[in-house]
Amino acid sequence: MSGEEKILEVKNLKTYFFTNMGVVKAVDGGSFHLKKGQSLGIVGESGSGKSVTSLSILRLVPKPAGRIVEGKILYRGEDLVKKSQKEMRQYRGKKLFMISQDPMTSLNPVFNIGNQIGEAIRRRQNVKGNDLREKIIEMLKLVHIRSSENLIHAYPHQFSGGMKQRVMISMALACQPEILIADEPTTALDVTIQAQILKLMEEIRQKYNTSIILITHDLGVIAKFCEYILVMYAGKIVERADVKTLFKGNKHPYTRGLINSLPHLGKKQQRLSSIRGQPPDLLNLPAGCPFEPRCDYSIERCSHEYPPTESAGKGHLISCWRWREI
Amino acid sequence: MPRSSRIWVHMKNAPLGGLTILFLLVMAALFAEFIAPHSPIDQDITQALKVPFFLKGGTLSHLLGTDELGRDILSRIIFGARISLVVGFIAVAISGFIGTCLGLISGYFGGKIDSIIMRVVDVQLSMPYILIALALIGALGPSLRNIIIVIGITSWVDYGRVIRGEVLSVKENEFVDLAKIAGCSTYRILLKHIFPSVVNSLIVLGTLMLGRIIIFEAALSFLGLGVQPPTPSWGIMLADGRQYLTYAWWLATFPGLAIMLVVLGTNLVGDWLRDMLDPRQRAVVRGKR
Amino acid sequence: MQRYVIKRFFQSLIVILGITVIVFIIIHLTGDPTDLLLPPEAGPEEKALFRHELGLDRPIYIQYFEFIKNITHGDFGQSFRHQTSAFSLIIGALPATIELTIAAMILSIVIALPVGIISAIRPRSNYDRIGMTFALLGQSIPVYWAGLMLILLFAVTLGWLPSTGRGGIEHIILPAITLGMFSTAAIARFTRSSMLDVLDTDYIRTARIKGLTEYIVVLKHAFKNASIPVLTMTSLQFGRMLSGAVITETIFSWPGVGRMAVQAIYNRDFPVVQTAVFITSVLFVGINFLVDIIYTYLDPRIKYK
């Protein structure tokens, strides 16, 4: 499935937002790597920093409040953090691409979709006129949209959410990126469409050996799609493991809580379990582990010292003082 | 974020310049008799067309010079503030009242009433308001009372549209439905539930409109169809100044400067109030994802 | 598309109808012209006869229909002062006003759009601050004062430009600047905020993700979206200019409709005033109608509403 070649290495990424009301440490020291053709999942609640991680990779963190304050993002050895916006344009649309959460707003409403897909195509090849049209039709076919002259001149508002997302994916295909980031690609869609989109993305991964980073809060999607998973909480990557280990052998209280809160078919359950407490206030994070207030396993040390990242097995990394006992 | 700290952030950004100007305006209007060095209407031909104090030949007794009838410019400006403010406030009140009532009715009841009122708004907006005002005053005769009424009538549209927009968005809120279910009378719903949501816009708009109405009044006076001499209106002073522009530039410059500063003040304060009171403000926290 | 155009056309007609009502009301407020037109010695029987001849003793709604009928034939009455049709007087003065308004509008757009766009792409920079400060000033300066000050500076003190009259380019500069000042400021501010809103959207982010140059992102993707509300604003400003032209034309003695109307008010020449109001308003309605049609080309979503 995926090779052993590491094409992306993120080291100690810190992306902060400087606001009138304080500093939000959206990503606080995240490190991970991505292999060629691998499907990596990032799971966490809203505000956990998963989206900001992807924006950081693309260097599209919203200015002026947001900034990468520290860390390296090595794409095939090149540190993207050090690149200027102009240099980043060599990567965006050619090597890196992202599909956003809300397909309803991701397409420009005043241009027809042929125009928008055409832009993506022309990033790679200088085609015009009829050749361009043919390529557009080809791209749409790859995402199973049967195109016609009318369709190419149609505007985004005339499409359904699922179709819009497929148009986005066809744009992604036109760019032929090495890394495709999909930020909650199915959250805004209904379940049947979700399955289609995921299937499409898997096809792409197989066919073109594209690495895919899938960001979501939906564990079901993660389980179906990802080979390796990062769990994020309040800007920190608290656990990372391959999919099987994560679901069966997880060792972080938060991960444990997440998995346990999934309702189980077939098993008798009295009540749904959930993680107690409130989501963290990113403006006022505690000195130690941010999950501490909600953690059933917390000890004194947790509230004032953040645990180091330790290895619990092959490819299984975890940041918790008490992971051995869990 | 607690509401009090949010208010504090806005207080920090208060436009001191604008607030100072408005404060001075109100002071001048209220206490003109005590502040002004001379009477605004006393003529003294021997003192005619004296230059402002900072030019050669100027004196400290007439800081901003005198006009062709020897009247002190500074004093006339100070008294002019009273006219501007009186016309301004009353006209704002009138247009605000009409506009709010019609806006509330239009927005809340919708349907035919809304269409009709909006048509009237469209019609009125299509017509050059200055010409209408001039025509009306030409017909009714220029007097302080008439100016205020005419300005009030021509200015209500701005309120009407904004208030209607506000009502439309508030109407969708659940608490309105709850009030209806609880059996509140329409009148009560409008007054107690919808109006408070709309008050903020009213305050912002009122501040901004004050500036525009002051300009409007001065425009009418400038064209001779506003306040009549010898009452000192800034507009009349400008009209006088126009005749003497080539050799007595101060007649026109200072009153106009006063108008500009006052309007600048209302704009600054109005913008600030809008940022503070409008719930749909651009997020102070950028990019929390 | 056609349905939309027809719908808007009929809406415009209704507005024009409303305008006639208001003009008619104003006419009647100006009172009985009998006393103006007849010599003061005229006795009550003469006045009654005169009124009857003018049709002033008939019921209001009949007078209104007469009024409408006359208007559709271009008959707005005779000017009291000059013995010609009010309509021809106004139409004669119209080109001057249109020339001035167009000049002011072009000036506004040419300055305001770049200022607004650049302010939006470099928010909070010095450039932005200065630009927006000027914009704020521009919206606070009364038209009449601006005109007088410009005359003071350029005509009186420097002697570079003439202060009155219509003629070559040098005659139109000062009036156009004066008339356009407020609009330039308003459009600049609005362009900035509209662009800022658009630059914040997901689809602009998509354009950036595609790796398009900033030039294309801003001018193609962002501006086309931002220009839609700016267009609305611009057409509103046009209407305001038609109003503001009254004062500007008076100050610069520009021979347009506005100046003629003001003179007419001084002379109590009401037919001319009514005609001026009517023609200007209809012009504005027409412009709005055209703008609405242009809209449908800019924003594809409109057609389907």
Image (cartoon, coloured by chain):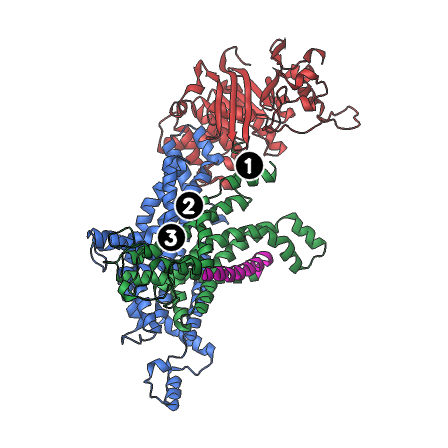
Q: In this figure, which residue is indicated by the disc labeled 1?
A: A161
Q: Which chain is blue?
A: C
Instruction: Say few, some or many: other residues with alpha carbon within 10 Å of mark 2 (under 14 / 14 to 19 / 20 or more).
Output: many
Q: In this figure, which residue is indicated by the disc labeled 2?
A: C190
**Is B97 inside the magenta-drawn segment?**
yes
**SS for dot 1:** helix
Q: In this figure, which residue is indicated by the disc labeled 3?
A: B260
Q: Magenta segment, principal secondary structure?
A: helix
Q: Amino acid at mark 1?
A: Gly
- Single out the mark in the foreground, 2 or 1: 2
Q: Position of residue A309 (x, y in %)?
A: 60, 12
How far apart are the alpha carbons under marks 2 and 1? 31 Å
Read off the magenta span: B85-112
How far apart are the alpha carbons under marks 3 and 2? 21 Å
Q: Which chain is red?
A: A
What residue sits 43% from the left and 78% below the top? Answer: C63
Label 2 marks a residue whose chain is C
**SS for dot 2:** helix
